[in-house]
Amino acid sequence: MAVLGERLRELRRRSFVGRDSEVSLFRTALAEPGLIFVHGAGGVGKSALLEVFGEVAEAAGRPVVRVDVRHLRLAPGAMPAVAGGDRPVLLIDTYELLADSDDWVREEYLPSLPGDVLVVIAGRQAPRPQWRADPAWRDLMRVVALDNLSPDDGRRYLTVQQVPPEWHGRLLAISHGHPLALSMLVDAVRRGAEPRTLADLPDVVSALLTQAVDAAPSPRHRAVLEICAHAPVTTEELLHEVIGADAGELFAWLRALPFVDEGPRGLYPHDIARDALDADLRWRAPGRYADLQSRVAAAMLARIRASVDEREQVQMLVDRIVLASARSKSETCTAPPPTMQAYADRLRDGDRDPIIAMTSAWQGEQQATLAAYWMTRQPAAFWVFRSLSGEPRGYAACLELTGAELDEDPGAAAMWRYAHDNGAPRAGERVRAWRFFLDRDHGQFSSPSVTLFSACQTLDILIRGDNSAWTLVGAYADAAQWRRTLADLGFQPAPGAEYTVGDRRFPVFAHDWRRVDVTEWLRFVRARQTGAPVHLTEPGNGKAVLSEPEFAQAVRDALRDLHAPERIRDNPLLRSRVVRQHERGDRPSVDTLRDLFATGAGVLRPDLGVLVDRTFLHPATTQERIAQQLHLSFNTYRRHRDRAVAHLTEWLWAREVGQRPTME
């Protein structure tokens, strides 16, 4: 009668798929002694692979000695003796537990084995540099980095497990092909679960953390892991910005983890480890999750703004968009196409003809003629998305609308009219309009150009948003396809701004930055990505968009009523853009306004600054007495007072519309 162990081995053998190259390597290695060193993250299938190696060796008539270090008493004498003469195979699993004895294993134990032995070591860490530094071991050792299952092998596994084909794509996307995760997802589906992300299965997350991630010796190390899960790439500089001291030591620890890889711009965890950490923290400590997300995003934003290389800025945003979208609960923001084979650049000589050709092919001759018109009028408005060879594979254009030259383009004219009818730009404010977008091969459907376009749009908001009144998006030809995505990004339909070019109708979406500034917009986008309830400010909700004369009157009224709470609370200046941009926490708006007045008075000419301070900020007596104290006639005092108020108003207005004046 077969024992239970044989039945278990048979069931495991049926479930084993893939790893063809690794098994082929082992079969070849059976012909001669040596060492195969297999390494990979927890749960990636090292033990299953060693089990298959053992069966292959036994089928070839080779004696097999199996050692799982978890079951040993860790002492030099605990490792088994191996008899020679029959070309034995020694399989050592969970080798990471022998890290402290690695020198002994390499220098004493393995050299003491019979000369005809084939050894396979499997552990989470790659072999230490000392293995490769020894020319003898370098010659005898083959290193195998075990990764997740390929999509084809993942589908084979799911088929063997009798999972319905309609589930295959979702389970592979959630698991990233990680064998342990895939196996646990199969079990969850069999129990009736319908997961969309790992966050839907806390028990799976817990198991994955134990297998793949639970390596943090302290809460501070765990925090570093969580930062690494949130950031597209992690650098020592980023750690220092987010957590402060010990960043160097913690970065070195993070760098040595088996599920963390190095790239040209920093460290990044394996996808399944990233997702498990993210889902666990979101479920376990939602408040801390939101705070960490905000701090990492702020540090990333500072890096983007500090960079002077547009291509680098776009790539950082691409990384952020791909990561945030992958964990988004909004269907319209998920799975952006990768951009590894494309990058964003500016318009160059030679781009004109390819852009006209792709536009004509997808959107007709009239649209192509308009693209050519704007390439001549505003060449700096164009982004070109290139393949690695440098040829244009797509493009987008964000026009600076001024009211001039709009008769040539019904799209630009329609967007300009909408902005004027719904909150005309004030002096110094800009109207930005995304008028064109295409991918040469995919039009406006899923492509690397779509992801690059999103990154360019975001960069335009972050870098040029201070003095923008409006950003309008009129580049998409399919309202149904893009309405929800743009709503999740804070852009609402602009009724009446739609326009027709040739036989195509283009919808328009709009955002008024004076009512919802970049800071509030960033909070909104982060909340929508995580599924948190949040709504953007709607027009007419009390946030003021004042004309310059209205703004000046509001400043005069606010100075007069600064110490009269019952009157100043109705002043529209408290709801203006400049005040909202400087608000912190729950601090009253009137206190923010008072601080702005004080800052503005400080940059005035000293005599005018003193006059503002004594008259409005810290009034101790009547204006007549103030004039006497300053040795001025009352008429002269009033003339200087009005001049000071005018300069202060000018200073505030410049900040209201995003300018940066110098004051005398």
Image (tube, grey):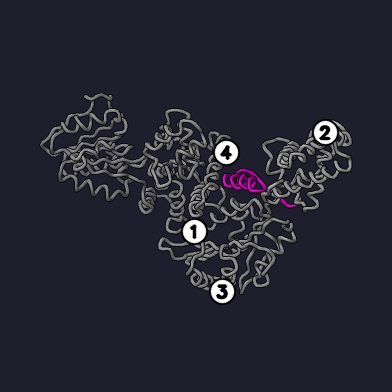
Amino acid found under the numbered disc labelled 1: Ala
The x and y percentages for residue 248 are: 43, 34
At x 75%, y 61%, the residue is 421
Quadrant of res 266: top left
Q: 457 or 446: nearer the eye?
A: 457
At x 31%, y 30%, the residue is 97
Amino acid found under the numbered disc labelled 4: Ala
| Mark 1 / mark 4, whichever is N-terminal | 4
Amino acid found under the numbered disc labelled 3: Gly
Mark 2 — residue? 619
Quadrant of res 289: top right
| Mark 2 / mark 3, whichever is N-terminal | 3
Amino acid found under the numbered disc labelled 2: Pro
Distance, label 2 to label 3, CA atoms, is: 68 Å
Q: Is residue 591 magenta?
A: no
Q: Secondary structure at mark 3?
A: loop
The reply to whether callout 1 and callout 3 are in contact (CB within 8 Å) is: no
Q: Secondary structure at mark 1?
A: strand
| Mark 1 / mark 3, whichever is N-terminal | 1
Mark 1 — residue? 344
* Disc 2 packing (10 Å; few <14; some 14–19; many ≥20): few
Mark 4 — residue? 290
The tag on residue 364 is 3
Q: Secondary structure at mark 2?
A: loop
At x 80%, y 46%, the residue is 643
The tag on residue 628 is none
> Residue lying furthest left in this view?
85
